[in-house]
Image (cartoon, rainbow, N blue to C red):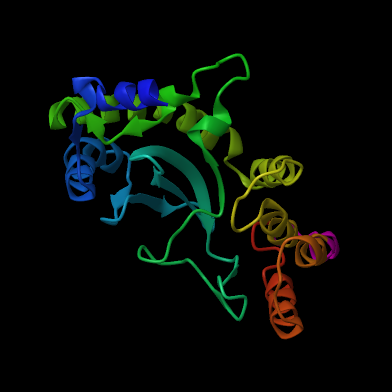
Amino acid sequence: MINLFKSFMKRPLSYDFLATNTQLKELLVRRISPALEAEGYQYNGEYQWIGPWENHSRRVIRVRLLKGAGGEFAWGWCFDFIPVPNGNGKGYHYERTDKSADLQLFVWSRDLISKSEINSRAYEFSLFGADLADVEQRLIQVFQRSKSLGDTWFRVSQGSDSLLAEAVRQSRQNNCHSPTPTYIKAFLLSALDQTDEGMQELDAAFTKEYRISEELQKKLCKKLQECRNVLVC
């Protein structure tokens, strides 16, 4: 135990500096935003970039802060026809504005890593470093490395049928996404004129994934019916 304590106390000097969240936001504005804004994204000032509408959906890129002063990037779609249950289970809201936009159908960079790629930490950055310049350099490296994965995922999942296929794929996995992929799949099915199938999936989401009142369930079922054919050309 003593040796472990001594080892901790003798941390490498490269980890003596810890950037603040304010400094991180400044780095995002100065080094990450220009590249994304050139592609049509707008930064909302709170770790998130929002793309333009594309047939009732828009791309969202987010930084998620991790325990231990780390962070990673997420890549996802936000829809204007999907009501999202509130955290308290007593209501719902839409995420249609730049301020309210959020991840709905999404992945983290580590979700896109090949199973043969062992070093998942290569897709996480740290606020620890030798100095702020060191933190900045590592942030840029992780962003560039992650963006290639995110861009590929956006291309593969783009389009109504591809979005549904991605929701189906994720619904078969054990993940902690919120909204859940099953819930998103239900509304995508209805939007593609498969409302009966969507209702079945929504019922499954209520049964297995959401603890909400019957009154709210009825409201969301009605919303699912209202978005029928939204994505049908």
The spot of residue 218 in percent (x, y) is: 75, 81
Q: Is residue 18 above or below residue 20?
A: above
Q: Residue 142: where, in percent of width, then height?
A: 35, 27
Q: For residue 28, what is the image quadrant?
A: top left
Residue at the extreme top = 116
- Number of labelled discs? 0
Q: Is residue 194 above or below residue 124?
A: below
- The residue at 34%/31% (across/down) is 125
| Residue range highlighted in magenta | 191-200
Pick out the residue farthest to the front: 2
**Quadrant of the drawing holding the C terminus:** bottom right
Residue 88 visible in the current orientation: yes
Q: Nearer the viewer, residue 53 or 129?
A: 129
Please tell me which residue lies in front, 18 or 141: 18
- Name the image quarter holding the N terminus: top left
From the viewer's perspective, tell me whether residue 233 is left or right of residue 18: right
In the rendered image, which quarter is residue 39 located in? top left
**Can residue 195 be seen here?**
no
Nearer the observer, 149 or 10: 10
Q: Would you say 92 lies left or right of 175 here?
A: left
